[in-house]
Amino acid sequence: MSTRQATITRDTTETKISLKVELDQGGNSEIQTGIGFLDHMLRLLEFHAGIQLCLSCSGDLQVDAHHTTEDIGFALGTALRTALGEAKGIGRYGQSLLPMDEALVLVAFDISGRAGCYCNLQIPSPRLGDFDTELVEEFFQALCRGGRFSLHLQQLAGRNSHHICEACFKGFGRALAEAVALTERGDQIPSSKGVLL
């Protein structure tokens, strides 16, 4: 079986990104975004997804973290889609109900070939460190555009902003692991249309 991996570079006036993802091995990830909180969230994502993520980004952080966060999300979605190829034999769907202390987040994920991100988050604090918490949704919106994925993120409980964000990234990682896992379908594409992505 060929290794499911992809390398993406993105070079714009706002960000310079180098990203490599491997779906079938975890560990030895290197993540440097220039935003401490985003590094932390991405490490949680890759750990719970069981993937390897090597990422470096130089962005216009003198403006704010928006372009960096959005472009990393888009690049990661694109890399995941590329690594999946025709998506033969995968589970396609993944879901997680992730508790993080008092926070509880439902994640439902579909490698559908159709971009859609539907978030219902109420994060109390506008900022965590140097990170605007509204960018959590921007990250996942961009990831879904880049990957042509469908994602629902529903906050069911939570008061602590860090816990809510952490539950989103951990929960997405676990849903991603389930969706990309190879099943007994073999070479079958998991769609009645015969095509994904």
Image (cartoon, grey):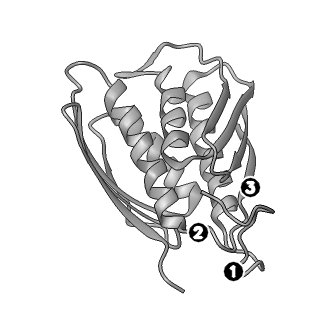
114 or 164, which lies in front?
Answer: 114
Q: Quadrant of the C terminus?
A: bottom right
Mark 2 element type: loop
Circle 2: is it few (<14), some (14-19), or many (20+) Cα within 10 Å?
A: some
Residue under the image location 57 percent in, 22 percent down: 161
Which residue position holds label 1?
Answer: 187
Q: CA distance from mark 1 to mark 2?
A: 9 Å
Q: Residue furthest bottom?
A: 1
The residue mark sitting in front, 1 or 3, is: 1
Q: Are marks 1 and 3 in contact (CB under 8 Å)?
A: no
Q: CA distance from mark 2 to mark 3?
A: 15 Å
30 or 185, which lies in front?
Answer: 185
The residue mark sitting in front, 2 or 3, is: 2
Residue under the image location 69 percent in, 74 percent down: 89
Q: Earlier in the sequence, mark 1 or mark 2?
A: 2
Residue under the image location 48 percent in, 13 percent down: 126
Which residue position holds label 2?
Answer: 86
Q: Compared to 57, does 92 lie above or below?
A: below
Q: Residue furthest right?
A: 192
Q: Position of residue 40 (x, y in %)?
A: 43, 41
Which residue position holds label 3?
Answer: 93
